[in-house]
Image: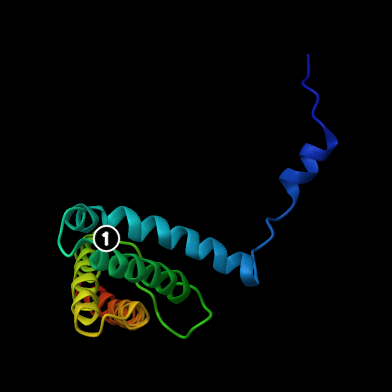
Amino acid sequence: MSRGTDHATEERRLRTREEKEGIEEWTESFFFAVGEVTFLCVPAFYVLMDAEPNGSLKFSALFGWLALCLSVGTFRGHWIDIDWPQVTPALVLLRFVFYDAVILGVAYAATGVDLAFHSPIVTATTAVVLAVGCARMFSRLGETVENRL
């Protein structure tokens, strides 16, 4: 006995996969960046759960996290001329340490700005600028580590 197959199934198997382009490609890159950053930053989020000053620290961490995710998602694509480091075991460890340090550093630095200026706009802007700058710095740091290994 032979198994019959559907003609549409056979056509689907033979077709080449369509590559994503434009906003669809960026959305996929951002989606994976959210997973990467969030998973690797769990220790930093745990530290920030009960830290004081509670409100401004969490506000700053939220904007820092979002800016870091957007930056990583954008930098890893080909839209900007930045060489984003590959995922290797050594660079996963570097990402783990770096992302946690960025979230904690941005949260505390932007909270300091909030306590000085009492302005949520200035606080959010500080968190975003610091997180984007740190993400840019990571691309160079990762490249340096890759070259030394």
Question: Can you tell which quarter of the image residue 133 is in?
Answer: bottom left
Expressed as whole percent of the image width and height from the top left, the position of residue 54 reads: 21, 61
Q: How packed is label 1: few (under 14 Cα within 10 Å), some, or many (20 or more)? A: some
21 left or right of 116? Answer: right
The N terminus lies in quadrant: top right
142 left or right of 23? Answer: left
Instruction: Please count the marks in the image.
Output: 1
Which residue is situated farthest in the right direction here?
A: 7
Given residues 145 and 120, the one toward you in this image is 120
Expressed as whole percent of the image width and height from the top left, the position of residue 22 reads: 64, 72
Given residues 132 and 56, the one toward you in this image is 56
To which residue does mark 1 refer? 92
Q: Which amino acid does label 1 sit on?
A: Val
Taking the spot 34% from the left edge, 72% from the top edge, the residue there is 85
Query: Judging from the image, what secondary structure is the residue with disc 1 in?
Result: helix
Q: Is residue 92 above or below residue 123?
A: above
Expressed as whole percent of the image width and height from the top left, the position of residue 143 reads: 29, 78
Question: Can you tell which quarter of the image residue 108 is in?
Answer: bottom left
The C terminus lies in quadrant: bottom left
Query: Can residue 19 be seen in this snapshot?
Result: yes
Query: Can residue 95 be seen in this snapshot?
Result: no
Expressed as whole percent of the image width and height from the top left, the position of residue 145 reads: 22, 75
Question: Can you tell which quarter of the image residue 101 is in?
Answer: bottom left
Taking the spot 28% from the left edge, 76% from the top edge, the residue there is 138
Given residues 83 and 68, the one toward you in this image is 68
Taking the spot 21% from the left edge, 66% from the top edge, the residue there is 94
The colour scheme used to paint the residues is rainbow
Q: In this view, does 24 lie above or below 120?
A: above
Which residue is situated farthest in the top direction here?
A: 1
